[in-house]
Amino acid sequence: MHTALVLVDMLNDFVDGVLGNPAAKGIVGPIASFAEQARASDEWLVVYANDAHHLSDVELRVFPPHAMAGTPGAAVIDDLRPEPDDIVVEKRFYSAFTETDLEATLRSHDVGRLVLVGQHTDCCVRHTSYDAFVRGYELVICPDATTVFEPGADEPVAVRQQRALEYLRTYYGARLAVSCDVG
């Protein structure tokens, strides 16, 4: 059984762009280090799950246009750019499984465990976690390499992050592990 490190929405529009998240800057280093470790192992696969929206997407009823397919805003930030052997999955919904080939890709690589990092613990990471759970994947979330969306909320990021992590642990059986200690 292999493990997939899934980087969720570490895109220009979510770090510095139209939906820029100051909290995302603190997770870039841990994600970069972890991705490098994963690439060094034959037992790991590195997968990017990236928003690539179309103007007709329902999510644009809630959020302004962001990460529009083919635009610079939909590109992975420079510090985390995919390498040639990495897999990139373009998504149009919160979950990386909805109307994508992610499940078929994971099955073809004999992946049984997903380690999720990126944004947003309480949205796209959460929805991807649910879909992984119902498909029977073992699930690991890295608190040091995930974050909630900071702008526009009254509660501190740390409080919202902890609540989101507890939800994933309680309802989906996710194991919480520091990114350098997933093993």
Image (cartoon, rainbow, N blue to C red):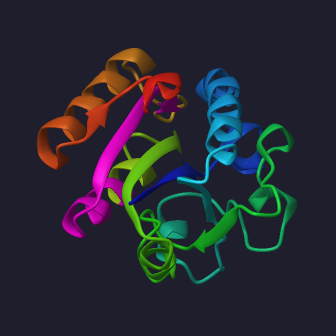
Can the viewer see residue 119 in this picture?
no
- Which image quarter holds the N terminus? bottom left
Corner quadrant of residue 31: top right
Looking at the image, residue 5 sits to the left or right of residue 164; the answer is right
Vertical side of 35 occupied by 142: above or below: above
Residue 156, percent across and down? 41, 15
Vertical side of 88 occupied by 11: above or below: above
Residue 80, percent across and down? 77, 42
Vertical side of 71 occupied by 42: above or below: above
Q: Seen from this angle, which residue lies furthest left?
A: 170
Q: Is residue 77 on the magenta stretch?
A: no
Give the tally of numbered discs.
0
Corner quadrant of residue 68: bottom right
Looking at the image, residue 5 sits to the left or right of residue 17; the answer is left
Can the viewer see residue 68 in this picture?
yes
Image point (67%, 67%), residue name: 88
Q: Which stretch appears magenta?
A: 128-147
Image point (53%, 53%), residue name: 43
Residue 79, percent across and down? 82, 37
Residue 40, percent across and down? 69, 43
Residue closest to the eye, 157 or 3: 3
Q: Is residue 139 on the magenta stretch?
A: yes
Looking at the image, residue 173 sits to the left or right of residue 112; the answer is left
Looking at the image, residue 37 sits to the left or right of residue 155; the answer is right
- Which image quarter holds the C terminus? top left
